[in-house]
Structure formats: C-alpha cells, structure tokens
Image (cartoon, rainbow, N blue to C red):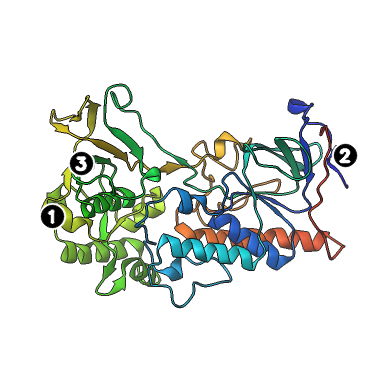
Amino acid sequence: MNNCELCVPDQEHDFFTGRCVLVNGPVIVGAGPSGLAVGAGLKQQGVPFVIIERANCIASLWQNRTYDRLNLHLPKQFCELPYIPFPRNFPNYPSKHQFVDYLESYAAHFGIAPRFGETVGSARYDGACGLWRVRTRAAAGVVVGSCESETTEYICRWVVVASGENAEKVVPEFEGLREEFAGGVVHACDYKSGEGFGGKHVLVVGCGNSGMEVSLDLCHHRAVPTMVVRSSVHVLPREIFGKSTFQLGVSMMKWMPIWVVDKVLLGASRLILGNIEKYGLKRPKMGPLQLKNTNGKTPVLDIGTLSKIKSGEIKVVPHGIKKFLHGGVEFVNGEILEIDYVILATGYCSNVPSWLKESEFFTSDGFPRNPFPNGWKGKDGLYAVGFTRRGISGASLDAIRVSQDIGKIWNRETKQKNRSVGVVCHKRCN
C-alpha cells in the first residue's frame, strides 16, 4: 500500500477534501513527556512515527499553563524519562524551567520533531482497511506540509493516545460568578505569580498542590488569600527526616502492605506537621497511597503553606460556596467574605472522549478502563500512555511497553530495513 486511496471509504465521511498523510508507523497524539517518551522508544526500535501537538511547543502544560514558582514535587529520579537521566548539576527538585530544558534536550537528542499547531478533531478505526484515520485541523497561520489545506487526515496502523490526564482545565459553575461578581476570575493554569495581587483579598478555590502553592505564592507577594477546602485532603511533609516522603513510601512498599506504609507516613506527618484538622484540613479515611492508587487523588506535599495557615496568613474556609455577590462570596454556612479576585485551582481533565471515536478502551472520563499496569494497550493498534495516575514514572513505564510492543510487530512484519514516513497529498481522500 503506497497511498491512502487504497482504503475503502469511511461511510460517515465519504467526501474528505483535505490533505492525506500515510504514516508507515504510529501517530502519537500529544508532545508532552508521555509522547516524547514513546517517540524516544520508537527511535530506539527504528520505527518511524508522527507526533501531533495542538500547541506551538513541547510540554505545553509545563511551558504555558503553570505558575512561575513551580518545582517538581518529587525527587528528580522519579521524574526522568526513559534512557536519559537529569543532568547531575540539577537540584533534587528541579524548577519547571529546568524540567522544560531537560525535555527540550531530550527531544533534540532523539531527533523528535512534532507537528505543532494541529488539533485532533477525530480518530476512528476503519475496519474495512484495518487502519486508523486521524483527522486534524491546523491553527490559524500554521502551514502543514506543502498542501494548501487546513485539514489533514493521517492514515496509520497504530494510534498512541498521549494527550494526558490534564489536557483541559476544569471550570465549575458557581451561581453569580460570571453574571454578578465584579472582581477578576482566573484559572490556576493562567496564574503566573502573585505580582500585582499585593494587598488584594483573593479567594483560592481548591486545596490540591496547585491551590496550596498558589496561596503560598500570594502570601509571598503580600496578598490576603483565603482557601476554600470543601473536601478532605491529605497533607504530607515533602521530606521526612531529610528523605523524600514519596521515596520512603516506595521503599517501604517493597516490604510492607500499602495500608501499613500509609499508617507510617501519617504517623510521621502528624509528628512533623501536627494535627492539621484543627486548621480546617480534614483528612480522608483512606490512607494517602491507597487513595492515590484507587482514586488517583494526589496527596499535598507541603513546602511551607501549612505554616502560613497556622499563622493565619492564609485563611481556610471548610465550607462550600453558595453564590458569588457583586463584591464578595457567600458560603453555605451563611458567612459572607469580601474579595477582589477568584483563582480557580479546580484541576484538569482528559479530553480523549471528545475526539477518540471508540468506547471500549477508554471510559467516558477519558481514562483506560483497565487500571495500571494493564491500561496501556487496547485493540486494533490503540495504545495509551500517561493515564496511570502515577505521574511521569508511571507514564515512562507505559511508554517503554508501548514502544517495545509496536517495535516487535514492526520488526517482525517489515522486510525493508529502512522505512520512512510517507506523505501523499491529494485534493480528495476517501
């Protein structure tokens, strides 16, 4: 097969008039750490591939949608991609800028060149020809290849979903927030620093790692933050007696059941942090590691926010929001608080269901149905990387599995030693 016209037409889309690209290897959706790790593994296997990325850079979440003070929450050895470690001179908890530099060097080392500015609109398996059809639309001003078309259809044997757990921001609806509240509203992904917030009363909605660190950053810039903590949360010290809490947990799980490890970590946390519940931070009944494994909810690793809460510089409101007023907010307990700004640290979600046209491998929430470590491979050449709820280390393990699996098939079925990505441009692609 040397061009996409040999495929039987897709009955739902008979008259696609855009540009067609025949990819001899897989199409990888997403150029974050997961997509780069898969690309590196495929390079090692000698398999050609195409990476499609809607942004104009790799790791766009890290480059464009994180606050300036962000550092990796885990030691660098748990955040490395396969095959290349962090530079030795990097600190134990690299900054976001250092992490991006590492990813840029990683991509350059393996010669990974994503196709930027293309958003996947749909990916569906065409059973008639046994291939995937991945349709994209180029951003304004982006020229894709030599064909004058905004839309492209990639025809490929394999699709690797690497768009990640945090593809889209979650913006909850609150009564009065849009139509009544006169202050500023921003999601945490658009927050860069507390500069410009000095002296302002800021309501931070959400108490995960982002909400805690944004509140701390606001304090450092002399703002007056109030944090809404509606649900229970585990807060752990980032280090216990000089050792990474995460590293200690991983080491202990080699010898102890996870519930025992949780009890040890919680005991040490109480010794170091004290009783956090008296400050409005209620702990979940399930232990932090068990909760992470079952629900994907990450514990907060404290880097100084708790001391600001204890001193009263950060106020905690353990009540839900009833509605927003012109110059403030009313909580469900009737308390009214005057505020100038709202920062929504309300998290992110997967966007896979919006474009992947299948329902067996992924759930409606955009995660593989089978939990880690069995959620990396579907059927008909569909794979997933970066949905383990175990951070970069989990994504790296899946990336190795995926690249080796595709490489095994590729090397078994391909007789020619040198295969490249074939690009064929047509006015009409059926």
Dot 2 or dot 1: first in sequence order is: 2
Instruction: Write down the residue under mark 2.
Output: 6
Side of 220 where 47 appears, left or right: right
Question: What amino acid is at disc 3?
Answer: Lys
Q: Position of residue 328 (x, y in %)?
A: 19, 30
Asked whether the beta carbons under mark 2 and mark 1 sit within 8 Å of each other, the answer is no
Residue at position x 64%, y 39% in the image: 141
Instruction: Write down the residue under mark 1.
Output: 310
What is the secondary structure assignment of the residue under circle 3? loop
Asked whether the beta carbons under mark 2 and mark 3 sit within 8 Å of each other, the answer is no
What is the secondary structure assignment of the residue under circle 1? helix
Asked whether the beta carbons under mark 3 and mark 1 sit within 8 Å of each other, the answer is no
Question: What amino acid is at disc 1?
Answer: Lys
Residue at position x 81%, y 51% in the image: 422
Residue at position x 62%, y 65% in the image: 108
Q: Which mark is residue 200?
A: 3
Which image quadrant is residue 403 in?
Answer: bottom right
